[in-house]
Image (cartoon, rainbow, N blue to C red):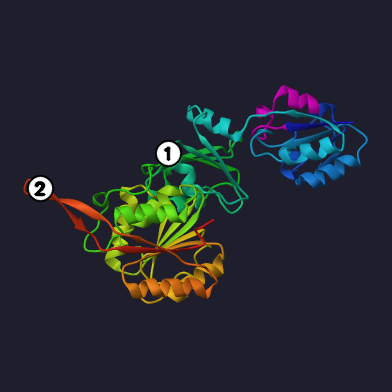
Amino acid sequence: MRVTLAALGGGTPETMTLACAAALKAAGCILGARRLLEQLPEGYTQNRIAAVRPEAIFEEIQRQDTDCAVVYSGDTGFYSGARGLLPLLERAGIESRVLPGVSSVQLLSARLGRPWQDWNLVSAHGTECGVVAAVTAGKPAFFLTGGVLGPAEICQRLAEAGLGELPATVGENLSYPDEKITAGTAAELAAGTFAPLSVLLAEAAPRGERRCAGFPDTAFLRGEVPMTKQEVRAAALSKLAVRPGDVLWDVGAGTGSVSVELALAAPEGETFAVECMPEACGLIRANREKFSAWNLHLVEGRAPDVLGELPAPDGVFIGGTKGGMAEIIAIVLEKNPQARVCISAIALETLSAAVAALAEHGLTAHVTQIAVSRSKSAGKLHLLTANNPIFLITGNCDA
């Protein structure tokens, strides 16, 4: 017995390769999704078994005593179930071959008259994906959609991240008689309704400068809101050991200077800036747009009250607590006992509260004092002017 894993392309006879058609003609049993089996043209065996999961298909194949063909939509090498079936066949010693097909990427590319070799290919079909990270990778993002995340839902996430004006295109029912191409902004497409068989192409979004932590203070919009200074920001990000896919919190975010740096350091993750002052919230929005930190989410409200709905963090910077230090630390470590925590303090009382809050949860606090002096012109001379010393208190950051 031999099993052929055959890609049907767009799902219509016109997009099926001759090799695939010949394999189906020779097969004594054809397996695959019910939708695909029902769309097969005349001339193929009626011994057809509807199955989707690789394990279920494998079990059915073992019951057969004839050559089988397993059909997939699109291409067997592009987010296909063939990936799960092949190892099962190999372990069982069943001979197999794979036939490629025309993918939805190729179909949309052809309809738009654009090459696709520089597209960022992402599957949102029945799975979560980093929508913002996908469009900020420096090239257009192609989304294979389905399930919870359709084109409208993806565009809604883009709009919520501040990318409502991003151009995008939806391809519905590609290769079928009711095929439709719709172009617009993310905000416009978020209000649309699209067929279950749809794909989305979002153009590349502006992205923030990738560099070492410690942007100049003058790069940020500030107003009268307190801001964590450049040297302290750089040290804090180093202490937190930020990784590209981290979920990060900035509690008491102020101008959002630390939030922006966290978001840019973790482009595949998400950063949540928690702030209760209206003026500061406006500055966070403005700085997010200025630095194109689209994975930065503003959470308006007072900590710890608004922390309960946030996802478990990998790292947390605490710049202000308004007296809620113990409660904030408790929520952070309840959500993730391994979360890396860095707290900044000017007052000795804040230092003491931070050390005590970490100790309450069995963590040893490591304290670093940062004293920064900057040069200032005085006629023909240059003098050093000292800033207030800052304490950085960390927990879980010594791994």
Instruction: Give the number of the disc on residue 204.
Output: 1
Residue 187 vs 391, above or below: the answer is above
The answer to whether 158 is drawn above or below residue 62 in the figure is below
Classify mark 2: residues with Cα within 10 Å, few (<14), some (14-19) or many (20+): few
Q: Residue furthest right?
A: 65
> What residue is drawn where x is 7% and y is 45%?
380
Residue 126 in picture, x, y percent from top left = 63, 50
Mark 2 or 1: in front is 2
In the image, residue 75 lies in the stretch drawn in magenta: no
Assign the N terminus to one quadrant of the image: top right
**How would you rate the neighbour count of disc 1 (Cα within 10 Å): few for under 14, some for 14-19, many for 20 or more?**
some
Q: Taking 246 as reference, is 223 left or right?
A: left
At 43% from the left and 39% from the top, the residue drawn is 203
Quadrant of the image containing the C terminus? bottom right
Tell me what residue is drawn at x 67 percent, y 29 percent: 101
| Residue wearing tag 2 | 381
Residue 13 on the magenta segment: yes
The Cα–Cα distance between marks 2 and 1, rounded to whole angstroms, is 49 Å
Where is residue 359 drawn, in percent x and y?
Answer: 50, 73
Going by the numbered disc 2, the residue's amino acid type is Leu
**Between 285 and 17, the one nearer to me in the picture:** 285
The residue nearer to you, when weighing 144 against 270, is: 270
Q: Is residue 39 visible?
A: no
Residue 338 falls in which quadrant of the image? Answer: bottom right
Write the start and end of the magenta stretch as one range: 7-23
Q: Is residue 367 left or right of residue 83?
A: left
Q: Secondary structure at mark 1?
A: loop
| Element on which disc 2 rests | strand
Where is residue 259 drawn, in percent x and y?
38, 56
Tally of numbered discs: 2
185 or 4: nearer the viewer: 4
Contact, mark 2 vs mark 1 (Cβ under 8 Å) = no
